[in-house]
Image (cartoon, helix red, strand yellow):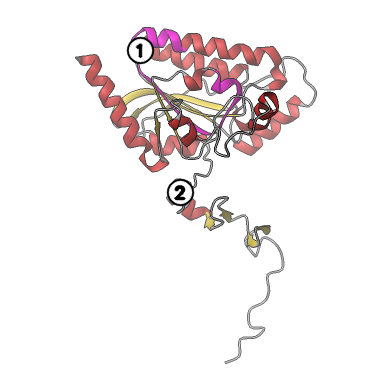
Amino acid sequence: MKLDGFFRKALNELEIGGRTKRVRGKEYTELTRPCPKCTRLNSEMELAEQLGVCTCGYHFRQNARQRIAYLADAGTFTELDAELESKDLLEFPGYPEKLASAKLASSEKEAVITGICEIGGTKVCLFIMEPYFMMGSMGTIVGEKITRLFETATRDGLPVIGYTVSGGARMQEGILSLMQMAKISGAVGRHSAAGLFYTVVLTDPTTGGVTASFAMEGDVILAEPGALIGFAGQRVIEQTIRKKLPGDFQRAEFLLDHGFVDAIAPRREQKAQITALLGLHKREVSA
């Protein structure tokens, strides 16, 4: 039986599964994502089941809500300060439009989500930065929300678990955004002085003022495989020191070899690793 012409051709992009793009000679649609490492086409359903990790081990970015769904014990997460959102305090040109666009892209009001939950049965304060809200850039509200979280943790005697992803301080808020580095660091210091535990997971990318402050102040610092971690960009450093840097410079594995992070934490193992660390801290405190 001849089937030529039996099935009609797709008439538009929606019928073929969305807009098509071509990467390294492979065509994909909005329902698939090519892996930058191995070029494999991953369906969105596959990635959801695999926590955003390709079969080759490449870690795609995850939004904050996806991380919360994986990390927090079911039904235990309570969000804090959800009503806070950035304002154009300095009347920076185009900033209101950028904020509106970021809210649409991320479905969030701000570049960090904070709350209280249980992880492996242990009650913790949790913050997770949102990559799809201006790449997790740190403005006054990000600083305020994280500071309040550490103050809550100090008052209630709770450990803090944090996930960073950021391009650094938000330039549209000028010096006000830079002040958040000291503000959060002060809250982290008071939390530490109270003998409480703080661990942070660095994800791709963690750069700028976030790296220069609370991202590197954890008692235990974990990093996702291949994550870009640094302060200034590699090209800027090379131009400053007039030397060529290694190709893997500022990647998580390079930082592990040079003592800047304590361990590489593959996404599927993170909850178990964090649960184990919380258990160790509880035993130390009780002893």
Which of 192/109 is in front? 192
Give the residue furthest to the front: 243
| 149 to 62, vertically: above or below | above
Magenta stretch holds residue 52? no
What's the residue type where badge 1 is placed?
Answer: Asp
Work out which residue is located at the far bottom of the displayed protein and give it: 1
Q: Which residue is disc 1 drawn over?
A: 156
Asked if residue 203 lies in the magenta stretch, the reply is yes
Label whose residue precedes the other's in the sequence (2 or 1): 2
Which SS class for mark 1? helix
Which is nearer the eye, 84 or 251? 251
Q: Horizontal placement of 263 versus 206: left or right? A: left
Quick one: quadrant of the N terminus?
bottom right
| Magenta span | 188-212
Does any portion of residue 83 appear in the rendered image? Answer: no
Label 1 crowd (10 A; few <14 / some 14-19 / many >=20): few
Q: Nearer the viewer, mark 2 or mark 1?
A: 2
Query: x, y (%) of residue 270?
Result: 38, 36
Q: Which amino acid type is marked by label 2?
A: Gly
Residue 221, percent from left and from top: 42, 26
Res. 281 image quadrant: top left
Residue carrying label 2: 57
Q: Quadrant of the C terminus?
A: top left
User: How far across and down, in percent of the image, does residue 228 sit?
Assistant: 55, 34
Residue at x-position 44% and y-position 32%: 257
Q: Residue at x 38, y 43 (%)?
A: 268
Q: Which mark is residue 209?
A: none
Percent x, y for residue 205? 56, 33
